[in-house]
Image (tube, helix red, strand yellow):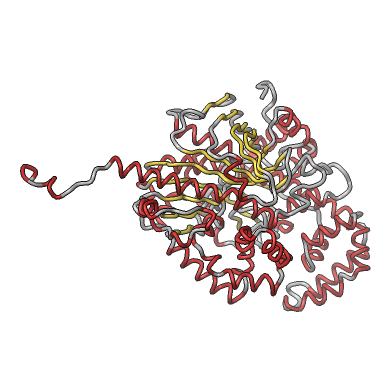
Amino acid sequence: MDRTTPAAGNEEIELYIRTIYSLLRSSGPIRLRSLEESHVGINSSLHHRADGLEIDVTALTYAALRLPACFPDVSLVVMGQMEEVFQRRGYPDVEQWRSVAARARRRKLYFHETRRILAAFIASVSDIDDMVPTMVAFQIEWNKLHQKLNPDHQFLQELQEVVQTDGPDARPSDKRPLAIGHFLTPERKERIRARLDLSEGDFETLCRLWPGWELVDNLHKAATRRMDTRVNVLGSGLSDYRRSVQMWWQRLDATHEFDLGSRPIYFVSSNTHSLANLFSGFIRQESKAIIDLILADRPEGLDDEYRRLLEEDPDQVSNLLYYASRFYLGHGHLGQEARTRFAQYETDAGMQRMRDPHCLDVEAQVIEMAKLKPDALDPRLGHFSDEELALLRASDAIILNIDYPLGMAAYHILSQVSTAVSDLLGVYIIGKAATLNGRIGDVMIPNVVYDEHSQNTFLFRNCFSAVDVAPYLRYGTVFDNQKSVTVRGTFLQNRDFMHVFYEESYTDIEMEAGPYLSAIYEDIYPKRHPLNEIVNIFINAPYDIGVLHYASDTPISRRQTLLSKSLSYLGVDATYATTVPVAQRILRQEIARQARLSQSSPSISPSDFSGDYL
């Protein structure tokens, strides 16, 4: 890349970022509306209608899915890295507040309903880069709802009446859907759509975002009040981020009966279900019950997909079962029993979880390779000889799999892990990305990464290539030898930004690879990672580096974006197409390591301790 090009590829984006951090340095809360002009000025690819009077439903949907449902009731957002930070700034009991969650973003959030305060635990500056523009976008679109609805006094009166007679305090919640269905007649829906000046497609999107009562409740709130949210970052020092990660690691280490720091570790940044499914054997054991559920309940039309796979590609049925297992495990009383069995299968296969992490909302799995059961492994992982299985049983290595963190949290976590463990054997990163030259469900394998945080261009040897992934990918295409750019936030990019990188052949846009490579650099070299340099870790890396991205968005294409189509089953296809090669690689690497260790350690017989040795 041309080193004279601004890191963000756009002056307006740089201005927006500087404005955010200059305002957040204030010791007191700042109003989100003070950021609205800068937000509009970047013409974000996710919010390109921010400056218009029409409601940008796609941006509203994207933001709403990444904020808790209570956000319209929030007056103040306070951010801190850990409970200690909240305590010293006057919020001593935030974890006693009501726990809330966003549908599409992992973050520890607590809401004080009386004081209308939302407490957000942040793991790195990336949480600020992500959450602040998201809140600004939501507020801009919410206030457009207010402008559209407020002048209609008759409709406001109707909303008021249904809220008073049908609200949570008026009658039991199990009676509300009947009244809401009566209120939301096709005629009234059409009137709401016309008042909001939305297309039929956009209005259907809004109804899916806020189904039933939630739509009426939010429209009533939007009609009666403008949003004027304030935000205050309580702790912004780098030391606070580092302490929160240290506490996370200490809790992880204390959760298990073995000393993580003394064991060789394969580090995986992925999710918490795919490796567990490949290793535990539970889903295949319960396959008949899952198939019966698919055929009976037909969730998401998976019964048609199941029949199609049986005819066209039976080997791919496993992915369908893995995907459908979420419906099976969540199926009432039977689901509870299945979850209990699943947990036991994981334990028997040497897997333990940290489900409720402190500070960082990053779940972790610890997998002891010596305890893996050969007959439980997914058949795609390959066949192992008796000798190879014996080598695995002799292994002292652990797979540490974390639920992929957001942005710079990846740097802090891997820095902590590489500092604490005795021997890091490999770093494998699987995650979502936007593609500028492919389609949703495709897989990108980069060997060049430009990082907006450090402004470094990293060159590295990716241990994976297209031939490793392609056999397991049914719906997409694999592109290797790609160039990736790590961005600071999803809203912090626009079409000009993307074209700057596209002209330099950067086609893979994501948020974690750059921070991970910065941490790897510091693990390899005796100094902090540089800034604004071309960094070659191609030769000196003493262990595997594997980076696999699957496309969840096509931001340049107008046909298909993350906002218009869910990954759904296509995402599971790409997830396992990338996870299978990682699991294969780790197993083969560990077998080879154990073989080398056994060859370098000569056996000792009783005669070696006779004579002068006694």
Seen at 82% across and 65% down, the residue is 216
Which is nearer the eye, 127 or 117? 127
* Furthest residue in direction left, as rendered: 611
Side of 448 where 502 appears, left or right: right
Q: Can residue 429 be seen at all in this image of the molecule?
A: yes
Camera sees residue 26? no
**How many discs mark residues in the rendered view?**
0
Query: Where is 194 relative to 136, above or below?
Result: below
Residue at x 55%, y 44% (from the top left corner): 429
Residue 401 lies, with reference to residue 45, above or below; the image says below
Q: Residue at x 89, y 71 (%)?
A: 185
Q: Is residue 528 left or right of residue 603?
A: right
Q: Is residue 415 above or below residue 160?
A: above
Q: Nearer the viewer, residue 355 or 477?
A: 477
Of residue 221 and residue 429, the one placed in the foreground of this image is: 429
The quadrant where residue 439 appears? top right
**Could you say where residue 541 lies in the image, as x and y percent from the top left?**
46, 32
Please tell me whether residue 434 is drawn above or below residue 388 in the rendered image: above
Task: Give the image location of residue 427, x and y in percent.
Answer: 49, 42
Q: Position of residue 544 (x, y in %)?
A: 48, 38
